[in-house]
Image: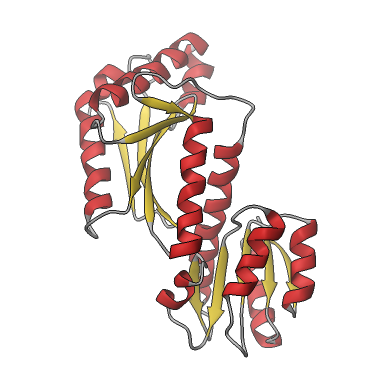
Amino acid sequence: MKVIVIDRDRDACEQLEGILKEMDAEVVFEPTKNTAMESIKKSPYDVILFDPAPQNEIRSFIMGVRRSTNSFPPIVVMTHSLELKDVTAAGANEIIKKPIDKAEVTKKTRNAARISTVSRVMADETEDFPSKEGLIAKSAFNQLFITCLDRADRHGERSYLIFVAVDNLDEIARIDGAEQADKVANNLRKTISRTRRTSDIAGHIKKAEFCLLLLRPTREDEPFLAANRFAETLKENIDLIATSPTKAVVKVWLLAIPSGEIPVEHVVKAGE
């Protein structure tokens, strides 16, 4: 994980350095926005930690980052005075209140880095999957994912992704062979295709990993209920999925955009 910290506060930087190094992060410190922008242009960062004091002007810096990188690297604002609604309205992903708390820095930096990880997976063109049976190709789903990041940047809009994956596919391939692993992956694809609602936007993003997009939820609990409902559906169909001698372990998790938080996670196994 590569992190850039933009902060004039030396004490805060020293504290952050210790915290981030414990996370095995590669950290670069820049005291000013201008020098930081030059560094960001030259090399991509997984997370940008930014204290806008003393002016507390955020939007122009964020727009500069978006334009110079032509992407949406996650930006976490560190502040004494601003609130979450203020920073998300300006296009930032998350907020860390000062004086900084180690647990909060660790959690929110990891969450932000998760957005970068997912972005790389979605943009990886080495393997795509055809759109069929109600599931769209990864390349097409990536455009929707980018739209979510863009709407979070421009409108502070939240969205959610439900990920579904065979967590032990490599183990199945190693013990039972590639044919069995392929069959399990295909079983999961068929189950998602058959059980998804017609209104669901679902993408095939890895061999045995799929993603459903929840745009502009009308209620706070809607994404959580959707993830729980999907996990229950998989439990009901796990015997149709886990056909290899080494039983498949299916994970379902909910990803919040723009924060990168995983508020819900389920593990589905045969016989449970």
State the colouring used for the structure image.
secondary structure
Identify the residue at image location x=61%, y=87%.
53
Quadrant in which the C terminus appears? top left
In front of the other: 115 or 71: 71
Residue 209 placement (x, y as % from top left): 44, 31
Q: Is residue 55 visible?
A: yes
Identify the residue at image location x=52%, y=47%.
146
In which quarter of the view is residue 166 placed? top left
Q: Is residue 259 visible?
A: no
Identify the residue at image location x=62%, y=73%.
60
Left or right, 38 with respect to 235, comes to right
Residue 154 placement (x, y as % from top left): 49, 63
Residue 133 placement (x, y as % from top left): 34, 19
Identify the residue at image location x=40%, y=19%.
132
Quadrant in which the N terminus appears? bottom right
Residue 64 placement (x, y as % from top left): 67, 66
Q: How many numbered dots are placed on residues in this image?
A: 0
Vertical order, 151 against 252 (above or below): below
Vertical order, 145 against 170 (above or below): below
Left or right, 133 with respect to 83, comes to left
In front of the other: 45 or 246: 45
Vertical order, 67 against 232 (above or below): below
In which quarter of the view is residue 78 placed? bottom right
Left or right, 59 with respect to 199, comes to right
